[in-house]
Image (spheres, coloured by chain):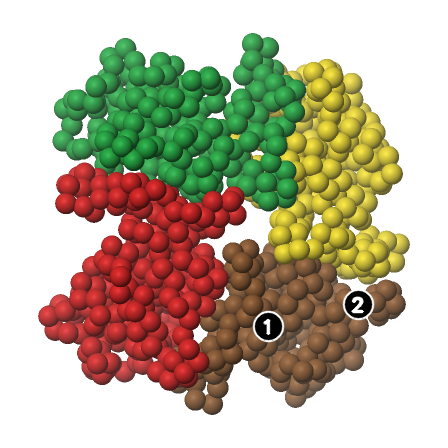
Chain colours: A red, B green, C yellow, D brown
Amino acid sequence: MRLTHLKQAVFEANLSLVNEGLVKLTWGNASGIDREQGLVVIKPSGISYDEMTPDDMVVLDLNGNVVNSRLKPSSDTPTHLVLYRAFPALGGIVHTHSEWATSWAQACRNIPCLGTTHADHFYGDVPCTRQLTPEEIRGEYERTTGEVIRETFTQINSMEVPGVLVAEHGPFCWGKTPAEAVKHAIILEEIAKMAFRTVMLGKSNAVQPAILEKHYQRKHGPDAYYGQK
Amino acid sequence: MRLTHLKQAVFEANLSLVNEGLVKLTWGNASGIDREQGLVVIKPSGISYDEMTPDDMVVLDLNGNVVNSRLKPSSDTPTHLVLYRAFPALGGIVHTHSEWATSWAQACRNIPCLGTTHADHFYGDVPCTRQLTPEEIRGEYERTTGEVIRETFTQINSMEVPGVLVAEHGPFCWGKTPAEAVKHAIILEEIAKMAFRTVMLGKSNAVQPAILEKHYQRKHGPDAYYGQK
Amino acid sequence: MRLTHLKQAVFEANLSLVNEGLVKLTWGNASGIDREQGLVVIKPSGISYDEMTPDDMVVLDLNGNVVNSRLKPSSDTPTHLVLYRAFPALGGIVHTHSEWATSWAQACRNIPCLGTTHADHFYGDVPCTRQLTPEEIRGEYERTTGEVIRETFTQINSMEVPGVLVAEHGPFCWGKTPAEAVKHAIILEEIAKMAFRTVMLGKSNAVQPAILEKHYQRKHGPDAYYGQK
Amino acid sequence: MRLTHLKQAVFEANLSLVNEGLVKLTWGNASGIDREQGLVVIKPSGISYDEMTPDDMVVLDLNGNVVNSRLKPSSDTPTHLVLYRAFPALGGIVHTHSEWATSWAQACRNIPCLGTTHADHFYGDVPCTRQLTPEEIRGEYERTTGEVIRETFTQINSMEVPGVLVAEHGPFCWGKTPAEAVKHAIILEEIAKMAFRTVMLGKSNAVQPAILEKHYQRKHGPDAYYGQK
């Protein structure tokens, strides 16, 4: 029963990525996790979004063993699994090749925090990973992609910066649920777009620390006063 | 009765911001004022635009005391109140994180008046405020945001330049009604977009004064001859 | 009867400008001419596109005398009239503040012919007028805008280059009919957009003359072989 | 019978180009080939997409002789024919003036492989042809356009890099079917757009060879593991 709900949530997250304009063709995937059962649900590989049903979502354990599914999981599954193991608070992950975030990832540049839109949702720069070595690429590539993300967050709290750019590749975002991961992907795309233009207009240094502190904490801190809480 | 009309107008202004593509998620708010009753009507905080009704609009007096509303007002309310107190001709205010105006605000640059589209509606550069000090940010941040806008308009007539960029943040626009404030936000976004490209093409100095004078006055001066007046 | 048809054609041309995304708010106008009767039909000034009917189109003679219309003509009418008098082959004119062409106009730069898309429709650069002098601006501004366009075409055939950028202002396009003028405005916007990006990528010198010659002539020359002719 | 199917496929490919936003007005064409019968089916010249039917598609042999059609074929037909003769694996070809790919073509620049989105589908840079000489342009221009593409692929496998930029002109893409050619045109446009922004952000050198190898081969190599194969 609970798994049925999770499959539905993951299915809807995958469709949202398309409807929000973050995914072209089959370039993206969303997953979710049931922490109690230790089961991950993820989009099948290379399936068109038009034909997909909630029941096509693939179920796996955290070691990547497929549980009772006839379709192959997304080829990026090993990356998702590393992240779920590394960051226990994650409930959902999305990967896209969304056009603005991917442009920054291709440029191998962090997205600096240039304004309050960014500071409201990401507590500091959106980091870009280091490039993988040829050995890492030739080996277990998708797993290593997860490892290099984990490495990037050694000094960063993954719940305060809920997304990353993989160098020469594109963004991964996450959240407490698949729907929240989608929301963070929407926000990342918007701040990537505005940061591009701000940099073109000549400013690429981050906002003053007080702005970052104020905006992030008024939404997410212990004394948050945004919304109807 | 009159308040019902104002709530409807403010509700519609908030929806217009979304329909015009100026607001993503819940990143924006519109308000209006009934000058005779001294009552301000504003969007509630962090409420999704899909679920909002006219009756959800929050009513406050000019000191920020909520009058007979069950929802919390937008967290930007103190900024709106400062502006209504500072500029007595204002009937409506909107705040957005619209993508082009925000890119300029993040760059901490005025939008120069580069053509007649701009001159038709804004009588000179759209100014960008100075950055707030860390002390101002840590204090009554939203009220101070209003104060720094007021300070920016010491030498500028707020009815001739009906909008501003708050540095590292985004635009506020205003008008005689909430609907006119929305219209100015649409125009600001369009001129911000074209100014970006013009600057990229190598021109960032303003039009000659005679163009600014001619275009602004033919629409807004005592001898205006645009439209069916 | 014939005037009814022209009013309908001008009405439709005005709506096309909006539907094609070339006009925001009321920032544009289209006109047409009946050369035999010497009558020009043009959009009324400052009227919303939603409320306009074919019968609202204003009829004038070539000297600007309104014939049997209750609405005021577009404030840009004197510009249209100069062009109809200067270029006898014109049957329709449109003026917009379309975002890409206007960005070039604001930059006071010709759009160089950078590819075959341009060469297929405009036989050479799309010229930008000189800036008006303060005296010209303070005088009969809209008429002088027409005069400066005429001056720009002293060495250019207006039927081979069916459009112009007015410096610090925006584009005018024309054609044998109002519908063809709209088509040229669509094309101008597209080539302005691509030229911007090409220039950003580092190339701003025009295509070789043989390409311009080949492409323009295969569509428009005496031995044209494009289409079903 | 088989030809009816091919006409339908070519018709649908032409409409897809419009629906995907790759073609404005009549600026594009798609074709397909029946290798056994040696017959090519292509869009008629200068016909509006709204009025076209599958039966309007023009049938020719590989020497360009029209077979039983009342309409003239696309003026770019000689280019398509050269490509079908040069690259025996091609089943479909599309030509567009899509805005991002054309901007690169106008800049006479290869699109470097800057990320995995590119590497997943194009095995290396998307090459830009050399410019044609004035003699080539004045001669059999469309046939020579095909020859210069063939020349560009002397050292490149046309099935691994299924598209090209013609200098000062625009892109041609191909595939095993007309539908696959359309898909490659969609992908080319997306990578052209992201490459533009990546270059503006300061990176224009290609990804490391190991990334190109890994991504291309995981989708297209003998041990491909993407999708449900």
- State the residue in front, C195 or B109: B109
Residue at horizontal 38 percent and vertical 74 percent from the top: A47
Secondary structure beneath dot 2 equals loop
Question: Does residue C16 appear to the left or right of D210 in the view shown?
Answer: right
Q: Amino acid at mark 2?
A: Leu
Query: Which mark is nearer the camera, 2 or 1?
Result: 1
- Location of residue C218 in the rendering, given as x and y in whole percent from the top left corner: 82, 58
Which residue lies most toward the left here? A36
Q: Amino acid at mark 1?
A: Asp
User: Is any atom of residue B219 visible in this view?
Assistant: yes
- State the residue in front, B140 or C54: B140
Residue at horizontal 20 percent and vertical 68 percent from the top: A33
Q: Is residue A70 above or below residue D178?
A: below
Question: Does residue C39 appear to the left or right of B203 in the view shown?
Answer: right
How many C-alpha atoms fall within 10 Å of the one at disc 1: few (<14), some, or many (≥20)? some
Q: Write down the chain letter for disc 1.
A: D
Within the image, what quadrant is residue C15 found in? top right
Mark drawn on residue A225: none
The quadrant of the image that shows the N terminus of chain A is bottom left
- Location of residue D225 in the rendering, given as x and y in whole percent from the top left corner: 39, 84
User: Is any atom of residue D219 visible in this view?
Assistant: no
Question: Does residue A36 appear to the left or right of B91 in the view shown?
Answer: left
How many C-alpha atoms fall within 10 Å of the one at disc 2: few (<14), some, or many (≥20)? some
Q: How many marks?
A: 2
Within the image, what quadrant is residue D51 found in? bottom right
- State the residue in front, C71 or B98: B98
Which residue is label 1 attached to? Answer: D125
Which residue is label 2 attached to? Answer: D132
Residue at horizontal 64 percent and vertical 81 percent from the top: D156
The quadrant of the image that shows the C terminus of chain A is top left
